[in-house]
Image: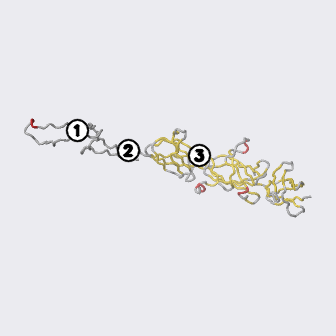
Amino acid sequence: MIFGGNHRFNSGWRSWPLLALVALLVAFPCAASAQLFGERPPPVPPALVPEAPSGPAISLAPSSGPASMPNLPAPLTQAPVAAVPLTTPPPAIVAPAQAVLSLTARFGKDLPVINSGLIWRVYSDRPDETGVFKLMREDHGGTPNIVLPPGSYVVYVSLGLVSAVRPVTLKPDADHETFVLPAGGLRIEGRVGASMIPPNQISFSIYKGSQFEGTERAPLVPNVTAGDVILLPEGTYYIVSTYGDANSVVRSDIRVQAAKLTDVTISHRAAVITLKLVSDKGGEALANTAWSVLTPGGDVIKESIGAFPRVILAEGEYRVIAKNEGKVFERGFEVVNGVDGEVEVVAR
């Protein structure tokens, strides 16, 4: 039996192997140059070609000597043709050798391999111009093989709330990296008397450390639903269990072990009470009634409006005040653990 605040409770917890649960959970195209080894295409002149001069036809037949050679007109002129160098196609660019990064995660150095539930992310080791580390690859496999160009990267892996990060440098071959994630599972349920509390009536918040450390802190995981499995780093935590929305609150320290599923059952000592304002004992409830439930010392526990408000209260003594049509009525009552019931206030 463990005591938290002013309320007594029992919390039972067992550890099971977590594996049973986690299982649920470039070449460029070559630009060929035109071949210049055949006939050279006619050059494009810079201006219009002048028409051939008119006159008698010119005979180019061989003659008996130089004296009989006719006077030829000046040849047609055109811009000189620049020599065009011969080019060869550039060589195809071969993609650099790729590296294979094999990744594995374990619950501990000598503990089993984690086969599911992992999130792997590989980032560039340097931020870009905006200061962001570029995400290169993401994988949700248990033991992925990620192909990347050789270079430096940062590898991140997470399992629930447990994570690890490591820089790696890849060479043009295979590299294997093993990460240790000391994670354990936590599953919580609530009980009152001999009955399990329905999940929609109870919630849990998980805090790091012990409730007796005396320091205020925000919950690590708020509003956990009964029966859900939460993956946490191995260590000590305390649970705040709230049954209903009044004063049935229980605190319990627990320990999470790596590779184990820890089942915790938190016992509340409380009951569900229905309030009624009646004109006569056993009569019909009066509508539009405002209710206040107080401790014997006068501290307000719960306020509501209605004919049949239901309130979950920790066991103990209380006083209820009912206001209807300007009149005030009250009575005392006691809550017994696990005994649900009605509290009638007679309007007299």
Pinpoint residue 208: horizontal percent, then vertical percent.
68, 45
The residue labelled by disc 1 is 76
Closer to viewer: mark 3 or mark 1: 1
Q: Nearer the viewer, residue 327 or 207?
A: 327
Total numbered circles: 3
Sequence-first tag of 2 and 3: 2
In this view, the mark in front (2 or 1):
1
Amino acid marked by disc 1: Leu
**Horizontal and vertical percent position of residue 142:** 53, 52
Q: Quadrant of the C terminus?
A: bottom right
Q: Considering the numbered disc 2 on the image, is that residue within a helix, a strand or a loop?
A: loop
Q: Secondary structure at mark 3?
A: strand
The mark that comes first in sequence, 2 or 1, is 1
Residue 199 is situated, as x and y percent measured from the top left of the image, at: 70, 57
Please identify, in this view, whether the residue under mark 2 or under mark 3 is nearer the observer.
2
Which disc, if any, is residue 163?
3
The furthest residue to the front: 55
Q: Residues within 10 Å of mark 3 (few under 14, many from 20)?
A: some
| Three-letter amino acid code of the residue under disc 3 | Ser
Q: Is residue 45 above or below residue 346?
A: above
Q: Amino acid at mark 2?
A: Ile
Q: Residue furthest left?
A: 64
CA separation, marks 2 and 1?
A: 48 Å
Earlier residue among tags 3 and 1: 1
Q: Residue at coordinates 11% horizontally, 37% vertically from top-left?
A: 69
Q: From the top left corner, tell me how far across and down residue 105 is, in percent.
A: 55, 49
**Whether residue 347 is situated above or below residue 57 in the rendered picture:** below
Left or right: 46 with respect to 63?
right
The kind of secondary structure element at disc 1 is: loop
What label does residue 93 carry, if any? 2
Label 2 – label 3 distance at C-alpha: 40 Å
